[in-house]
Amino acid sequence: MSKTWTIAEAKKIHQLPITELLFRAQTIHREHHEPDAVQLCTLLSIKTGACSEDCAYCPQSGHHNADLEPERLLPVEEVLSKARLARERGATRFCMGAAWRDARDGHQFDAVLEMVKGVRELGMEACCTLGMLTDEQAAKLKEAGLTAYNHNIDSSKEFYGEIIQTRTFKERLDTIQRVSDAGIQVCAGGIIGMGETDGDRMGMLVTLANLTPQPESVPINALVAVPGTPLEGREPVDPLELVRMCAVARILLPKARVRLSAGREGLTREAQLLCFMAGANSIFYGEKLLTTPNPDADADMALLRDAGMKALIPTIEA
C-alpha cells in the first residue's frame, strides 16, 4: 500500500533547494525506471473543437473565440495511417483525443473502438481522452484493448472552479474511478501557469498520489496561453517551476511515467534535460499536441542522442 500524502508534506518537498530536490527525485527515479530512457508518445486530435465545456485554457471550447476550425471525427483509416507513421518515427504509445464533454454511444464511439483495436494491432500502446465515460463504455474500451485513458484533473479541488464551471472536480474523479474499475490504466495530470498558487499545484499532485491505484502516467503541462481563450494574457511559466513539478511528481508517484507535456516547445534543451533529471521520462512526440505546437520530432531525437539517452521500449501487454 502506497503512502498517503498531505499537502503540507508536498509543499515541504517542493520548497527544497533545487539541487537537493533533483537528487531525491533522481534517486527514486532510478529505483523504478531506466535512468536514460524516455517514452515517446504521439497525440492526435481525432475530433477537434466545438466542445461544450468552458475550460478557460482550452482553444477547443465552443465558449471561446480561439482561431480554431472545428473538425468532425476523423475516419478510422486516416487515424490508423497516422498511427503507422508515428510508429515508424519511434513512438510506442498513440493517444487519441476527442473534444467531447462525454463520450456518446453510437457510430462515433464504435469508430473509436475500431481505432483502439487498430492501434493495438500495430503493436503500440493505445490511449484515449474522450471526456466522461459510463461504466459500459469503459468496459467496451477495455475489451477493445485500450492501454490507458487520459482524464486530467487540471488543478486542485479549490482552484478548479476558477477555470471550469461546466463540470465538477468530483465528476473528474468519478470518471477516473470508472476507468480504473474497468482495468484500464489511468493517465491523469494537470496544468500549471493558470493563476494557481503553489499550494494548488501540490494539492493537484497529492490528489493524484492518493488515488488507489496511483495513475500509470502523469502529464505535467505548462499553460500555452492561446489567443481567444480567457487565459490568453498569462505570462509563461518559469522553466524551473516545471522542473520542480516534475521532481515532486516523481517523489509522490514513484512508479508513474511523468510526462513532460504542453508548453515543452517553449523550453530550451537544457530545461528539458533538467526535467528528465527531475524524473520526467515521457514526452509527446510530433509536430502538434492536439491543437498547439510541439517540438519537431527530429529535434527531439537529436536531443536524446546528444544527451546519450534513448527511446523507451515498453513491454506492451497483449
Image (tube, rainbow, N blue to C red):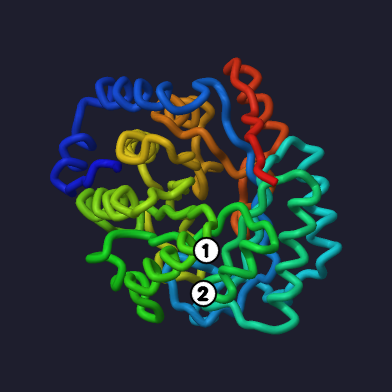
Please say if 270 is above or below 281.
Answer: above
**Are circles 2 and 1 on residues that touch, CB within 8 Å?**
yes
In the rendered image, which residue does mark 1 sit on? 182
- Where residue 28 appears, x then y in whole percent? 35, 26
- Where residue 66 appears, x then y in whole percent? 56, 72
What residue is drawn where x is 66% and y is 40%?
316
Looking at the image, residue 211 sits to the left or right of residue 148; the answer is: left
Image label count:
2
Dot 2: within a 10 Å radius of its alpha carbon, few (fewer than 14), some, or many (20 or more) residues? Answer: few
Please say if 19 is above or below 220.
Answer: above
What residue is drawn where x is 56% and y is 69%?
138
Which numbered disc covers residue 135? Answer: 2
What residue is drawn where x is 29% and y is 71%?
162
- Where residue 31 appears, x then y in whole percent? 40, 23
Please say if 147 is above or below 45.
Answer: above
Image quadrant holding the N terminus, namely top left
What residue is drawn where x is 49% and y is 37%?
267
Q: Which quarter of the figure has residue 171?
A: bottom left
* Secondary structure of the residue carrying numbered label 1: loop
Looking at the image, residue 228 sits to the left or right of residue 305; the answer is: left
Hey, what amino acid is under mark 2? Asp
Dot 1: within a 10 Å radius of its alpha carbon, few (fewer than 14), some, or many (20 or more) residues? Answer: some
Mark 1 or mark 2, which is nearer the start of the sequence? 2
Q: Nearer the viewer, residue 129 or 185?
A: 185
Please say if 138 is above or below 103.
Answer: above
Q: Nearer the viewer, residue 270 or 98?
A: 98
* Secondary structure of the residue carrying numbered label 2: helix
Label 2 to label 1: alpha-carbon separation:
7 Å
Q: Nearer the viewer, residue 212 or 278?
A: 212
Looking at the image, residue 3 sits to the left or right of residue 308; the answer is: left
